[in-house]
C-alpha cells in the first residue's frame, strides 16, 4: 500500500511541476522551488494539508525542497532523474515543459493554491523573492539544527490561524498512527 501511495505522490509532483510550467512558461528552477513553497503554504493555511509531500529546508536563498533539488541536479548532469521526459533543462537553469500536465492528479484546491502561489511571486525579482521568503519563520528555521521546515513552520509563515495549526497537528498525528 505504501508503495502505491509513494508512486502516486511522485507522479503527482511531476504533474504539479508541469501545471506550474503551463501557467508560467519557462522558468528557472529557483522560481519553481519558491512557487512550490508558496503554493504549499497557501494550501496549508486554507486546507490544512500539503499538495505534495515535499520537505523544505531553509538554505541561504530561502526554502528549498531537497528531493526536487536533487532530481534537478541529476537532470542537469545528464543522469537518470524523475524529471527526464517531462521537462528539459535549458541553459542549465531554465525548465521547459515537454508536455501538458495531467490534471486528473490535481484537485481544484491544489490548482487554486498553485495559482495563488504563482501570483504571490509574480513580478518579483530574484532579490525581492529572496527577501520576501526570508521572514521570521525562515530565520528561526535557519537557526535550528536540521534547518527543516515543519508543516507548522510553513503554515506559520503564511499566518495560519491557531485553529488551522491545531488541525494540521491533529492530521499529522492521525497519519503517523496509520503508518
Image (tube, rainbow, N blue to C red):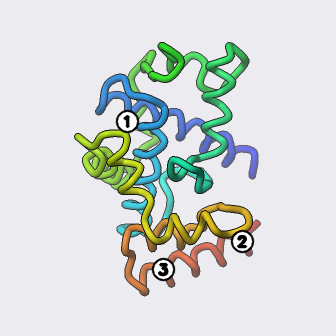
Tag shown at residue 165: 3
User: Marks 1 and 3, how far apart in space?
Assistant: 27 Å
Who is closer to the viewer here, 60 or 155?
Answer: 60
Q: Which of marks 1 and 2 is nearer the N terminus?
A: 1
Residue 134, horizontal then vertical, whole percent:
44, 59
Q: How many labels does the image show?
A: 3
On screen, residue 174 versus residue 2, left or right, reads left
- Of residues 11 and 1, the one nearer the viewer is 11
Q: State the CA–CA distance, disc 1 to disc 2.
A: 30 Å
Residue shown at 38%/34% (left/top)?
Answer: 19
Q: Quadrant of the C terminus?
A: bottom right
* Distance from Cα at disc 3 to Cα at disc 2: 17 Å
Residue 57 sits in quarter: bottom right
- Image location (x, y in percent) of residue 107: 39, 49
Q: Is mark 1 on a helix, strand or loop?
A: helix
Q: Is mark 2 on a helix, strand or loop?
A: helix
3 and 2 marks in contact (CB < 8 Å): no
Would residue 56 be seen by someone viewing this image from the given angle? no
Q: Between disc 1 and disc 3, whose residue precedes?
A: 1
**In the figure, 87 relative to 72: above or below?**
above
SS under mark 3: helix
Of the residues tagged 3 and 2, which is closer to the observer?
3
Q: Dot 1 corresponds to which residue?
A: 20
- Graded by Cα atoms within 10 Å as few (under 14), some (14 to 19) or many (20 or more), the crowding at tag 3 reads many
Residue at label 2? 176
Amino acid at each position: 500500500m505504501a508503495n502505491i501511495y509513494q508512486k502516486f505522490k511522485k507522479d503527482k509532483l511531476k504533474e504539479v511541476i508541469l501545471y506550474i510550467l503551463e501557467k508560467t512558461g519557462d522558468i528557472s528552477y529557483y522560481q519553481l522551488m519558491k512557487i512550490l513553497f508558496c503554493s504549499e503554504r497557501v494550501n496549508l493555511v486554507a486546507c490544512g494539508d500539503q499538495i505534495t509531500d515535499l520537505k523544505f529546508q531553509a538554505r541561504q536563498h530561502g526554502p528549498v525542497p531537497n528531493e526536487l533539488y536533487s532530481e534537478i541536479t541529476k537532470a542537469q548532469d545528464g543522469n537518470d532523474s524523475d524529471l527526464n521526459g517531462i521537462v528539459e533543462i535549458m541553459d542549465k537553469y531554465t525548465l521547459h515543459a515537454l508536455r501538458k500536465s495531467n490534471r486528473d492528479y490535481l484537485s481544484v484546491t491544489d490548482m487554486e493554491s498553485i495559482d495563488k502561489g504563482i501570483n504571490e511571486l509574480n513580478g518579483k525579482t530574484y532579490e525581492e523573492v529572496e527577501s520576501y521568503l526570508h521572514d521570521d519563520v525562515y530565520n528561526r528555521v535557519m537557526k535550528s539544527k536540521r534547518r527543516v521546515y515543519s508543516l507548522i513552520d510553513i503554515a506559520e509563515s503564511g499566518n495560519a490561524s491557531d485553529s488551522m495549526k491545531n488541525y494540521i497537528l491533529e492530521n499529522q498525528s492521525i497519519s503517523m498512527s496509520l503508518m
